[in-house]
Image (cartoon, rainbow, N blue to C red):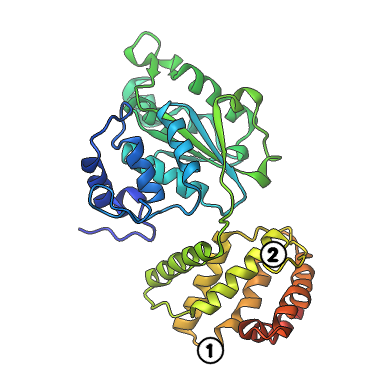
Amino acid sequence: MTIVRQIDPPEHRYADELEFLAAADTGPRPPGWRLTPRAVVTFVAGSGGVPFGGRVVAPKFVGERALVERCVVTLAGERGLLLVGEPGTAKSMLSELFAAAICGTSALAVQGTAGTSEDQLRYGWNYALLLAKGPTPESLVPSPILTAMTTGAVARVEEITRCLPEVQDALVSIMSERRISVPELTGTDGAVAHAVPGFCLIATANLRDRGVSEMSAALKRRFNFEVVPPIADLDAEVALVTRQARAAVERGGAAFAVDDAVLETLVTAFRDLRTGLSAEGWEVERPSSVMSTAEAVAVAASIGLSEAYLPGPDPLSLLPGHLLGVVRKDDPGDAARLLAYWDGALRRRAEGGARMWRQLWEHRDVLRD
């Protein structure tokens, strides 16, 4: 029976490509790795339009190849990798791609929250078996990290700074000693679980969340930090937003029919508000809300679904309302900053004769509701 998923993990989505890369590059690979480091970089960053082993590999991550190479070298050395950056810069996706390429699964993950417990990083118990048989290896429930340690796989911790400090500290001994002690099993072979070759850990953290639970100096020393920046190139970001929005709409059973000019206008507006500077060099008051590529994809997909199911005369008329919804997420006062953007940079473009911006200016009243 074929399983249809809303979001297919990369090890399934790119299974054929991963199998090809494993066979195409037979060079040296770190212990436990399914691909060579060079093949991992190619899988994530693409082959640059040049055939790799006879096949052109498309990039999955839009960003600097040097960043991907540094990450792969860190993981090849079995050192912890911490991906930091603004929300919506594809840190989680990047960690999933690395895990899928290196060990064949991205599923060994812990989602960091204020409610994440130390057990979720180490181990827990099947209480029915615990009551029936006592503490035995069979009644122990390994965490994703413990499973990764004992199988030589990649473990992932999402939003590590959202975990409480005492929970984060559980990782210090795991990453330095590379073992987890199970006192309840003292006297048995399962009293200490040792990491086998290939085990490594990738964590992610949002720069805006640093104040939630600051990482200790001891934990920071166990990681190599890599900053994942927003996409620098406009065309690359438009292409990414188009591709992902199209996939989201088609998953919903509809055809994606948003004009390229509308998508470029959408992405340009997001970039202006994100950076505080227009492409022309005009200053823009930045909202406190995150104007990320991920948010741009969500807006593009919403416009695409509206056009598919509730078509109107002008898809661009939907953009102001969606932008207003984005900026109000963190601070309702950002609505005034969005209106200032409309009356500033956007109006200047409209007065300069740009057709799409003239149309967008005509929908200014939406922001005053």
Q: Which residue is under mark 2?
A: 273
> Along the horizontal axis of the image, is 188 left or right of 205?
left
Q: Position of residue 120 (x, y in %)?
A: 49, 33
Sooner in the amino-acid sequence: mark 2 or mark 1: 2
Q: Nearer the viewer, mark 2 or mark 1?
A: 2
Residue drawn where x is 70% and y is 79% of the image: 349
Q: Position of residue 252 (x, y in %)?
A: 40, 71
- Disc 1 element: loop
* Label 2 – label 1 distance at C-alpha: 27 Å
Residue drawn where x is 37% and y is 20% of the image: 134
Q: Amino acid at mark 2?
A: Leu
| Closer to us: 6 or 344 | 344
Above or below, 259 against 111 in this view is below
Quadrant of residue 138 within the rendered picture: top left
Residue drawn where x is 47% and y is 37% of the image: 71
Above or below, 230 against 83 in this view is below
Above or below, 267 against 184 in this view is below
Q: Could you say which disc has been placed on residue 3 in the image?
A: none
Q: Which residue is under mark 1?
A: 312
> Along the horizontal axis of the image, is 32 left or right of 74?
left
- Disc 2 element: helix
Question: Which quarter of the figure is the N terminus placed in?
Answer: bottom left
Quadrant of residue 207 within the rendered picture: top right
Q: Position of residue 227 (x, y in %)?
A: 58, 42
Q: Residue furthest front?
A: 50
Q: Amino acid at mark 1?
A: Gly
